[in-house]
Amino acid sequence: MEINQLRLLVVEDNEVSRAVLESMLNGLNVRAVYPCESAEKAIEFMANEGYKVHMILCDWQMPGMTGIEFLRKIRQTKNDVPFVMITGNKDAESVQAAVANGVNAYITKPYQPKDLANKLSALARKIRGHTD
């Protein structure tokens, strides 16, 4: 699968960060971006339209429910959609916790569009059978 075929759920509570990420994704010609300002809204979206998503890009630090807590809820439903954690947490413990909870890729802030493109491309190559 190529980046321009991807439908991505973006979960980011900070409006500016969400807009910057959406802009980067649009610059990469991603097929569709579904923005959510909280993990709770993302859970609602996943319950109703999660089948449309090839990947989730999620901030770690959010009020109400953290990115890790959201990931755990997603994985409890046996949903194995690739999950990209985007965070300012650069310490080894955070990376290990993310991997232990099923994160497929980890991007630290600040990041460049090429870093995002490289991570998405690597994950997209692993997605099979979802080209509609």
Image (tube, grey):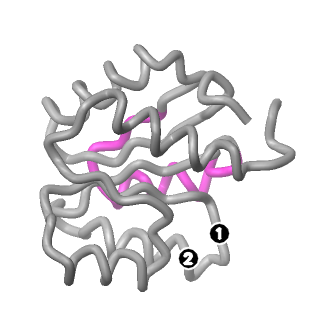
Say which quadrant the C terminus sits in.
top right
Q: Is residue 27 magenta?
A: no
Identity, as a three-letter code, of the amino acid under mark 2: Arg
Which percent across, then down, holds residue 70?
38, 69
Q: Identify the residue shown where x is 42% and y is 85%.
A: 100
Which percent across, then down, holds residue 15?
16, 34
Disc 2 + disc 1, Cβ < 8 Å: yes
Q: Is residue 105 left or right of residue 80?
A: left
Q: Is residue 104 left or right of residue 25?
A: right
Q: Identify the residue shown where x is 57% and y is 46%.
A: 122
Q: Residue furthest right?
A: 129
Q: Is residue 41 magenta?
A: yes
Which percent across, then down, holds residue 119?
46, 45
Say which quadrant the N terminus sits in.
top right
Label 2 belongs to which residue? 75
Q: CA distance from mark 2 to mark 1?
A: 5 Å
The vertical placement of 5 against 73, above or below, is above
Comparing 87 with 14, the one in front is 87
Q: Which mark is residue 93?
A: none
Mark 1 burial class by Cα count in 10 Å: few <14, some 14-19, many 20+: few
Q: Which mark is residue 79?
A: 1
Q: Quadrant of residue 129?
A: top right
Task: Label 2, secondary structure: give it.
Answer: helix
Q: Quadrant of residue 88?
A: bottom left
Mark 2 burial class by Cα count in 10 Å: few <14, some 14-19, many 20+: some
Q: Identify the residue shown where x is 34% and y is 38%.
A: 115
Q: Identify the residue shown where x is 17% and y is 35%.
A: 17
Numbered range of the magenta stretch? 34-51
Q: Is residue 89 left or right of residue 119?
A: left
The vertical placement of 29 against 40, above or below, is above
Which percent across, then down, holds residue 118?
46, 38
The vertical placement of 61 against 102, above or below, is above
